[in-house]
Amino acid sequence: MGLAQLKYLVRQNWRIYGRIKGSFGKNQRFTFPRIYGILPVVFFLGYVAYRLEGLVSFWLIFGMALLFLELGKVVNKCSFDPIHFFYFNGQFSCKFRYLIVMELFGIKLLVLLLFGAVALSGPSTLTALSILVFLYCFLVTFFVFMSVVGNRMKTVSVVYLWLLIMGFSFLFGFSGLSSANDRRIFEMHLPFQQWVNSHYATILLFLVPVLIGLYYTFGYFTKQVYEQNPFINLASFPYKMI
């Protein structure tokens, strides 16, 4: 993949969020990019993660921010698909990488940079930042996998939408953001946080091959579904061409 292609793909990822519109007024006369409503929520989550000062809460809130962005894209039925890369020469694995690169360097990168800055300001910088990068790469790969498969299988698209909603709710409940049980949640986090700190090197050595294995696993199953159903199923979450 050349630098020009990379820049083009990343720019398209940013554009797709910019074109998600909200409307208000009589006959929905006035419109505005919904990204202006999404980004303040993301920055607020980053601020909360900074104030809580807990590693586990920090990672959970980071996951919430990514799920929130992905949920906005899915609900508004905007996604890229390997079929959009028909003009690129290359096998499916190459197009699958294109999709992942678009997401890695797309608008979700703002979340990684924001929470990366929060991690650098904390006491456990290396631990917080390294696992943050792993979570980012894993979730982006998972998003791409579910999007491509969901575009072709209606059941998967419905399950994926509810999975995002339930995942966001689960992370909210266990992140400590709820004032009703925040102290108890933080007490639950403490043993796990201590375990991560004491076994950091082993965990990191374990996560790297896990991430590589998941990439090839997701790629394999995505390819199987794509070869059996090369075209998008409009009964799933439909797509909008840019």
Image: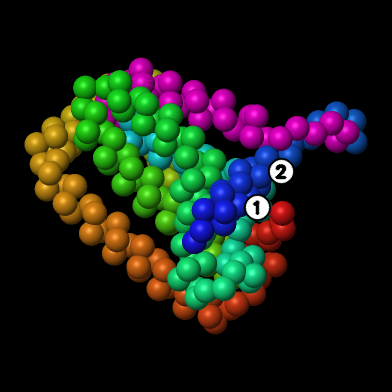
Identify the residue at image location x=31%, y=46%: 134
The amino acid type of the residue labelled 2 equals: Arg
Residue bearing the label numbered 1? 78
Number of numbered tags placed on the structure image: 2
Percent x, y of residue 28: 85, 35
The mark closer to the camera, 2 or 1, is 2
Res. 156 in view: no
Q: Is residue 56 magenta?
A: yes
Residue 37: quarter of image: top right
Q: Is residue 160 magenta?
A: no
The amino acid type of the residue labelled 1 equals: Cys
Q: Check if mark 2's residue and mark 1's residue have beta carbons within 8 Å.
A: yes
In space, the residues marked 2 and 1 are separated at their CA atoms by: 9 Å
Q: Most extreme residue toward the top, as rendered?
A: 51
Residue 68, compared with residue 46, is above or below; it is below
Q: Which residues are magenta?
A: 28-57
Res. 140 in view: yes
Q: Most extreme residue toward the left, as rendered?
A: 198
Tag 2: Cα neighbours inside 10 Å, few (<14), some, or many (≥20)? some
Identify the residue at image location x=27%, y=41%: 131
Residue 236 is left or right of residue 128, and the answer is right
User: Does the magenta stretch mainly form a helix, a strand or a loop?
Assistant: helix
Protein image colouring: rainbow
Residue bearing the label numbered 2? 19
| Quadrant position of the C terminus in the picture | bottom right
Residue 187 is left or right of residue 103, and the answer is left
Residue 111 is left or right of residue 182, and the answer is right
Question: 129 or 218, which is in the foreground?
Answer: 129
Say what secondary structure mark 1 lies in. loop
**Lower sequence index among marks 2 and 1:** 2
